[in-house]
Amino acid sequence: MTTFDSAMRHAQSLDAQDPLASKRQEFSLPQGVIYLDGNSLGALPKSVASRMQQAITEEWGVGLIRSWNDAAWYPAPQRVGAQIAAMVGAKPHEVITCDSTTVNLFKVLCAAALAQPNRKTFICEEGNFPTDAYITESTAALYGKRILLAHQGNIEEVIAQAGGDLCAVALTHVHYKTGRMLDMARVTQLVQAQGGRMIWDLAHSAGVINVQLNAAKVDYAVGCGYKYLNGGPGAPAYVYVREDLHADLQQPLQGWHGHAVPFAFEQGYRPHATLDRLLVGTASQLSLIALEEALRVYAGLDMQAVRSKSKSLTQLFIELYDSHIAPFGLELASPRQASERGSQVSFTHAHGYPIMQALIARGVIGDFRAPDILRFGFAPLYVSHEDCVKAIQILQEILQSQSWQQDKYQARKAVT
Amino acid sequence: MTTFDSAMRHAQSLDAQDPLASKRQEFSLPQGVIYLDGNSLGALPKSVASRMQQAITEEWGVGLIRSWNDAAWYPAPQRVGAQIAAMVGAKPHEVITCDSTTVNLFKVLCAAALAQPNRKTFICEEGNFPTDAYITESTAALYGKRILLAHQGNIEEVIAQAGGDLCAVALTHVHYKTGRMLDMARVTQLVQAQGGRMIWDLAHSAGVINVQLNAAKVDYAVGCGYKYLNGGPGAPAYVYVREDLHADLQQPLQGWHGHAVPFAFEQGYRPHATLDRLLVGTASQLSLIALEEALRVYAGLDMQAVRSKSKSLTQLFIELYDSHIAPFGLELASPRQASERGSQVSFTHAHGYPIMQALIARGVIGDFRAPDILRFGFAPLYVSHEDCVKAIQILQEILQSQSWQQDKYQARKAVT
């Protein structure tokens, strides 16, 4: 007890100095829950519910079709894109919000393939989030590319090996299982030095890392709206393309919203002059409105401050793990070096699944990733240092009492 | 006046016998509006607002990540697909809800191309909704197909011309401008007689026509959720594949939700055994919930009764046009034969745009499609025969007074 008492006093002093502490009040968090899964589904920003009610009853219910103009539905993909651009170091017109991350990754992989038809190598990461591998595989098949697999430890060698045949490299900035973060600027530079195009998946970076796409001269990036951006379940995704690549940008998902003049209803496709050419069908407007409202919690925030708090939370969590959890056989799967770590701390344990179920039953919500990963995500806008201490204390109790061995925690269920 | 008085009495007697009349109360329609644009954005079913509030505050806000299981978010694409299947004459597992109509059309065009690699001809319709043409064009380029253009008048000859080289035909069942409906069973049979695959776009059919996909042995179909299905702006789309085609179904948008075991996080793609293989990224859950709730207004309805009312409304509208509008130079662009007409009546006029603007200003909401089409859609669940009379009366007043010539109605704006 004494140990946790002193840890709690330390955590409270860190929280007292936290410049982002007041942000927590902008979220609706259930009583009795410590939510460490914002890397899977972000918590609900309080203002979303009333904004959505207005959108449904007034904009849709009363405005009806007129709201595409009168309620500015039509320019929402660009407007929300600009909000996200401000968070990832891009220009407002370099990001557009649409479709899913996988579909957007398909668009930019195709764009890279079409831009460099004579270069035949894609590199993707073994152990990356599977959807990235699946879509890279199928795009490679469409355009006659071969795939070289790299892993986080040998990416630089594999890039060198591809040499002048390198067409594009698709990597995730922060690994979904381990939280390990790659050096965006360095890897991008190495890829471009071979004449290849660099694609980053920002699923686990945007909203917690001070991502600087322009400074790193990144070619393409994609990301999702429902993790740290708090856009709600299945929120629209986004795609970034550096502005000098817009003019020649081609991709096969040619839809009417990407046409130069969508409402002229021309029969032949002519791509829009801007990034609008990545739009396909009608925007998922209700979901876009939820995401737009959710992003207001980030308005005017310094992403460096967000990143600092993220480091502070994960650092404390690892320190508490060292003192209280390591003896029970959980292995740390995330980097100890803060500069190599996203906003996530993961452990491995052979019985990771029932341990996580027991934790969730006690109100500490992280998640499990097969075969043996316990993940904890730290959303700096609503997670406190005090939450870290409480979560570790509960985890220790579960491990000590072995309560995770109860039958009810052993049954396997799908989780996203 | 006498003429409209008698027309109104006739309309009221038709409304009095309308078995669907009570359905109107299930929609939230603004005062003073006659809404004839359900073919562009369906009206708001009243129960959607409270259902969405619950989904946001309870399922997202309190349930958080747990709601993927506990609130049955995960199986929503299949569940909503089954609701739609019941409306279009398909088996529950033959329809899945996901992505946009254009993206789904891409998937089934690719599926047809991959299934019949040696057949090199796609047929699409000149004058079809442009996005269908754009995506057919780009899919043809990916798989080395040529495109034969047909129009509604010569489709049968073009199918015969393609002969044994025919791979797939993509047509829209009800034309977006004229409302002309093709004979689904006959065209499907002709295409299949040549060994080709038939793809129908049901954007303007589902929810108003008694579509019978299984009876017509249709191979593939796609459609959108935001028109007559009333799912809200940019609602998710759906895709149908006949069950005997599921086992060999391939398409390049390989995402983790289409994997055989999504939560095993396998690195290699193995398609799911079912139509789930058409899923790509995480489902747009908030939009799916809105669509699912909206579809409840159709639960248990006989689609033949819906179709009968649709015919009755459009028939009356055309009769009223003949007596009151034709003299002002608007030409009827829709078929007079009810069996050849969807739930839409269109006129052409050189000044169609300002005339429609003047109508909208008087509360009669239809829409305009370049270059000269005035469209009126009749959603049988909330449009009455009385609405038809009132709309024609206001249109006649506008034409008689030439109020559409005012400057404020001449300015061009984009509309969807």
Image (cartoon, coloured by chain):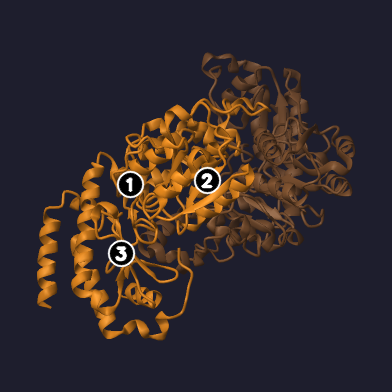
Chain colours: A brown, B orange
In the image: residue B348, left or right of residue A370: left
All told, the count of numbered labels is 3
Which three-letter amino acid code belongs to the residue tagged 3? Pro
Q: Position of residue B390 (x, y in %)?
A: 21, 70
Q: Which amino acid type is marked by label 1?
A: Asp
Residue B289 image point, x, y percent: 42, 43
Q: Residue at x 34, y 42 (%)?
A: B186
Q: Nearer the viewer, residue B19 or B62?
A: B19
Q: Helix, strand or loop at disc 2?
A: strand
Under mark 2, the amino acid is: Phe
Depicted A88 relative to depicted B118: above or below = below
The residue pinned by badge 2 equals B122
Asked if residue B412 lies left or right of residue A140, the reply is: left
Q: Chain of mark 3?
A: B
- Dividing the picture into quadrants, the one containing residue A171 is top right
- Mark 2, other Cα within 10 Å: few <14 / some 14–19 / many ≥20: many
Query: What label does residue B183 carry, if any?
Result: 1
Q: Is residue B63 left or right of residue A301?
A: left
Position of residue A332 measured from the top left corner of the image (x, y, whole percent): 76, 27
Q: Between marks 2 and 1, how big is the CA–CA gap?
A: 19 Å
Q: Residues within 10 Å of mark 3 (few under 14, many from 20)?
A: some
Q: Residues within 10 Å of mark 1 (few under 14, many from 20)?
A: few
Residue A87 screen position, x and y as percent:
69, 55
Label 1 SS: loop
Whole-number angstrom distance, CA of label 3 to CA of label 2: 44 Å
Q: Chain of mark 1?
A: B
User: Do tags 2 and 1 sit on the same chain?
Assistant: yes
Give the camera-side residue of B174 and B257: B174
Q: Which mark is residue B30?
A: 3
Query: Along the polypeptide, which appears first: circle 3 or circle 2?
Result: 3
